[in-house]
Image: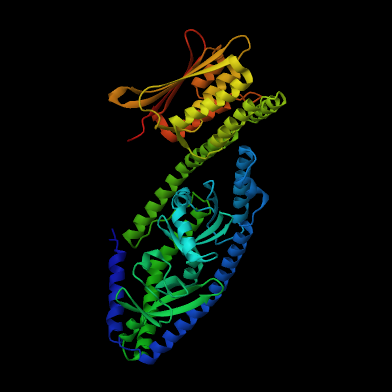
């Protein structure tokens, strides 16, 4: 049997032969070549900076115009500052946030925009895709530091803030204590320029007119670049190529290491002719050998990977007869395609399942019938001149809607129970003494985090299906800690009522985790809660449906206790 050759040793032999010959020609380049190439690189960098500088300038101009427009006191902003009703303020917030999200996509470089009402401590924001909620939250946490910088820098000036690990450029405009600001990651401003320059630069900075670097990671080192052709950084000398961004008090500085790769060319040798001849001969030999033993097998591998990329999971590679490395790669590739084919359907179905659950969650967040009934109730109260009751209903409905529209995956038990109380309060304004709620908490359970709308969904289900004019509906909610197997502590939640209980067919479907959809959409909320619990907790979550001994529906939920 023919012994397989190692590709590693084959390449070492070829490269060693090439290096031995090239070492004789290593001192071949003259200083004038170095200076000529250095000038060409510098001219190329300046031309590239000029192209991208115009793009950056145009984007900043557009952002500035957009912020100026948003700073005007429009009707919605007047409602936000001095609303006649709390509902007006709430609707103004929704309108402004919606406008931010619609408009921000028109500005490629703009990462986020926010409005801050200092008087009422109202913060509204809109961000681009790719900006995390943590970054948006960090701006709000440091809002007063940002406004302090704004007061120092002056109206219309760009200045820097640190948003988590990113240094950002921000511009703030103020009108009647309403602050409108847009922020851009410096990294995003220079991203396309870095791609355009490629390896032609070692550092790219955004600077102020005084030459101070705006990257906060370098600001502490007091680097100033304006008026300096050469800069020493990290004990290395760099050529400073700088171009101003007009009308914004900014400039772009590109630092290219002096000499750079040309320092290696300086020691390459002195005889260009010998080098060219040697390289020509050796290149022909190397190309032949590499093509025969390396490039052809590698090309087959690349073609197979391209087919795999295009969706062909049946592609296979023939065993290489020369090198054991290619044999291992080919076999591994074939095994990988088989695993991808077997996992693709499972992963796809799981993703679709998750998306459907999330979509259903969004669909059931707002019950249009409930909202319509509440608005009708408020109207009737006003017609009956029960202004205090109408005011109470409006405040409670506002709190209810604010909670329902929040995007948090989890909320505290305290907030969830407050939401349940608001819901029952609205229902009692309509049904009066036909409905009552009993809440029971044992232990320090207020801070426990549970899925949003978890308890309220089951309370709502009891009201919808068990409320009757003939008798009073009593809903009991109990939250406590329990200890089960292996002394592990769990959060226990129970929702029960004194109604007629679950119908037998419905109860059977609930126990089997089946989708329950009637013509009017009943029970979709319960199914969605079960799906969200499975996505969040997996097998650690447990829910049990049943009817009590004395009648009425009983839902018992067990969740893992939050880590301290």
User: Based on the displayed image, in which of its 4 quarters is residue 557 positioned?
Assistant: top left
The residue under the point 42% across, 45% down is: 339
Viewer-closest of 414 and 238: 414
Q: Is residue 285 above or below residue 373?
A: below
Tell me, yes or no, if residue 191 can be seen here: no
Q: Position of residue 356 (x, y in %)?
A: 55, 36
Q: Residue at image x 57%, y 16%? A: 435
Q: Is residue 19 above or below residue 316?
A: below
Residue at 38% across, 67% down: 219
* Percent x, y of residue 314: 49, 49
The answer to which image quadrant residue 463 occupies is top right
5 or 428, nearer to the observer: 428
Q: Position of residue 65 (x, y in %)?
A: 62, 63
Above or below — where is 180 with respect to 356?
below
Query: Where does the C terminus fall, quadrant-wise?
Result: top left
**Colour scheme in the image?**
rainbow
What is the x, y in percent for residue 391? 62, 30
Name the residue: 59% across, 9% down. 471
Query: Would residue 23 be seen by someone viewing this image from the given angle?
Result: yes
Farthest right residue in view: 383
Query: Which is more toward the observer, 28 or 264?
Result: 264
User: Which residue in the rendered view is the most extreme toward the top?
Assistant: 550
């Amino acid at each position: 049997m023919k012994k397989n050759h190692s590709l590693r040793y084959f390449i070492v032999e070829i490269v060693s032969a090439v290096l031995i010959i090239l070492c004789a020609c290593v001192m071949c380049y003259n200083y004038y070549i170095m200076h000529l190439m250095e000038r060409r690189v510098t001219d190329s960098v300046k031309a590239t900076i000029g192209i991208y500088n115009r793009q950056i300038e145009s984007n900043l101009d557009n952002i500035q115009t957009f912020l100026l427009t948003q700073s005007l006191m429009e009707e919605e902003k007047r409602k936000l500052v001095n609303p006649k009703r709390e509902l007006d303020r709430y609707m103004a917030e929704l309108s402004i946030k919606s406008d931010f999200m619609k408009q921000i996509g028109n500005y490629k470089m703009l990462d986020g925009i926010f409005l801050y009402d200092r008087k009422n401590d109202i913060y509204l924001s809109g961000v681009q895709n790719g900006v995390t909620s943590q970054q948006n939250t960090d701006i709000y946490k440091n809002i007063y530091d940002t406004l302090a910088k704004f007061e120092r820098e002056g109206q219309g000036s760009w200045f820097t803030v640190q948003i988590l690990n990113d240094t950002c450029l921000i511009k703030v405009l103020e009108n009647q204590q309403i602050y409108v600001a847009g922020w851009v990651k410096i990294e995003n401003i220079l991203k396309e320029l870095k791609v355009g320059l490629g390896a032609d630069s070692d550092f790219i900075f955004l600077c102020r007119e005084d030459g101070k670097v705006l990257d906060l990671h370098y600001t502490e080192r007091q680097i100033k670049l304006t008026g300096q052709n050469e800069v020493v950084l990290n004990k290395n000398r760099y050529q400073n190529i700088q171009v101003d961004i007009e009308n914004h008090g900014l400039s772009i500085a590109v630092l290219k290491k002096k000499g750079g790769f040309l320092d290696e060319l300086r020691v390459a040798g002195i005889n260009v002719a010998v080098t060219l001849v040697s390289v020509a001969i050796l290149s022909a030999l190397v190309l032949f050998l590499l093509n025969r033993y390396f490039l052809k097998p590698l090309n087959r591998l690349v073609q197979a990977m391209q087919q795999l990329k295009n969706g062909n999971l049946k592609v296979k590679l023939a065993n290489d007869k020369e090198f054991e490395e290619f044999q291992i790669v080919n076999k591994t590739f074939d095994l990988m395609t088989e695993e991808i084919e077997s996992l693709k359907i499972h992963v796809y179905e799981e993703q679709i399942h998750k998306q459907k659950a999330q979509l259903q969650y969004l669909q059931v967040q707002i019950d249009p019938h409930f909202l319509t009934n509440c608005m009708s109730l408020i109207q009737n109260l006003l017609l009956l001149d029960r202004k205090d009751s109408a005011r109470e209903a409006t405040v409670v409905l506002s709190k209810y809607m604010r909670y329902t529209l929040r995007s948090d995956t989890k909320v505290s038990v305290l907030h969830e129970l407050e939401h349940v109380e608001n819901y029952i309060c609205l229902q009692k304004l309509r049904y009066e003494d036909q409905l009552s709620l009993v809440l029971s908490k044992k232990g320090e359970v207020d801070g426990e985090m549970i899925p949003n709308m978890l308890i309220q969904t089951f309370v709502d289900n009891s009201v919808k299906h068990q409320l009757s004019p003939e008798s009073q509906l009593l809903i009991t909610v109990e939250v406590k800690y329990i200890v089960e197997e292996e002394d592990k502590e769990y959060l226990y939640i129970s929702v029960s009522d004194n109604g007629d209980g679950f119908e037998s067919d419905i109860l059977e479907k609930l126990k089997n985790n089946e989708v329950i959809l009637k013509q009017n959409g009943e029970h979709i909320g319960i199914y969605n809660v079960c799906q969200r619990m499975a996505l969040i907790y997996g097998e650690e979550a447990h829910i049990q449906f049943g009817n009590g001994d004395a009648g009425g529906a009983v839902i018992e939920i067990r969740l893992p206790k939050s880590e301290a």
